[in-house]
Image (cartoon, rainbow, N blue to C red):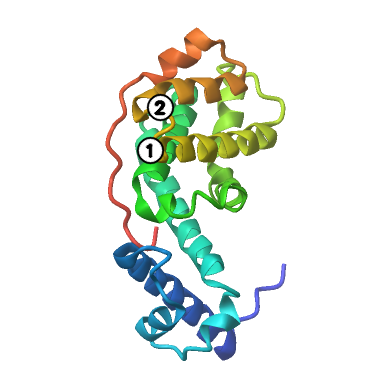
Amino acid sequence: MPEPKPEGRVARRQRRNRAALIRSARDVMAEKGVDAATMLEIAERADVGAGTVYNYFGSKDELAVAVLETLMHELAVRIEKVTDTFEDPAQVYAFGIRRVLDTATTDPRWEQMLHRSEVIADAIFRTMGPFAIRDLRLASTANRFRVSNPELVWRMTTHTIIGASLAITKGEVPAAAKNQIVARMLCMTGLDLDAASELAARPLPDLPPYIEGE
């Protein structure tokens, strides 16, 4: 198998610029919110030309989604550090979807993008899918779940998470109902409501901090 070609100077610069813009946008949006953040301020903080940002992102919303995708990946890594200690593969998946729901309803960077539900659900599907789909398969192999199409179950779950998060952040559904919401999502795996409710009510260990580079 031929070795991959080394990354060229232009490609390295483009990768660094894109990463710098995402880091800058992440900081600015955390400080001011998505709506108040400006592309000019983001570009200046990333130390790139004002017009350069549009070479990588067509709009502020597109950049905000890229920021969210980095946060989603970090969350998946943090979840995995906890669930690696679980013996029950069904609990691995249940803990994951509960923590995603918690984050979507408490992290302002997620909350401010929830109105773009289809875009955010797709981002969760793509970014966290490799973890969630693997967990669905492992739980099915262990006969804890009955899932023949894990991709479909995960896609339906992502839309449920975003819909429920919107309802919670708007005050239409109480945050105290999260266990019930998670239980209903677990029913999509083939569990009956009693088993799903027991799984959803299990203790939730704290998430460890994310270490850059993981």
Secondary-structure class at tag 1: helix
* Spot occupied by residue 16 in the image (x, y as percentages of width and height): 47, 80
Name which residue lies at 34% across and 70% down. 28
* Vertical placement of residue 10 versus 150, above or below: below
User: Which circle marks residue 93 in the picture?
Assistant: none
* Image position of 144 (left or right of 152): left
Q: In which quarter of the image is residue 188?
A: top right
Where the C terminus falls, by quadrant?
Answer: bottom left
The tag earlier along the polypeptide, 2 or 1, is 1
Name which residue lies at 37% across and 66% down. 29
* Spot occupied by residue 22 in the image (x, y as percentages of width and height): 45, 71
Q: In which quarter of the image is residue 109?
A: bottom left
Q: What residue type is labelled 2?
A: Lys
Where the N terminus falls, by quadrant?
Answer: bottom right
Instruction: Say few, some or many: other residues with alpha carbon within 10 Å of mark 1 (under 14 / 14 to 19 / 20 or more).
Output: some
* Vertical placement of residue 83 versus 58, above or below: above
| Residue at the extreme top of the image, as rendered | 194
Question: What residue does disc 1 label?
Answer: 102
* Image position of 17 (left or right of 125): left
Q: What residue type is labelled 1?
A: Asp
* Spot occupied by residue 62 in the image (x, y as percentages of width and height): 56, 67
Total labels drawn: 2
Circles 2 and 1, Cβ within 8 Å, touching? The answer is yes
Of residues 118 and 136, the one nearer the viewer is: 118
* Spot occupied by residue 191 in the image (x, y as percentages of width and height): 57, 14
* Image position of 117 (left or right of 101): right
Q: Give the alpha-carbon distance from disc 2 to disc 1, as whole Å.
A: 8 Å
Question: What residue does disc 2 label?
Answer: 178
Q: In which quarter of the image is residue 145?
A: top right
Name which residue lies at 69% across and 34% down. 152
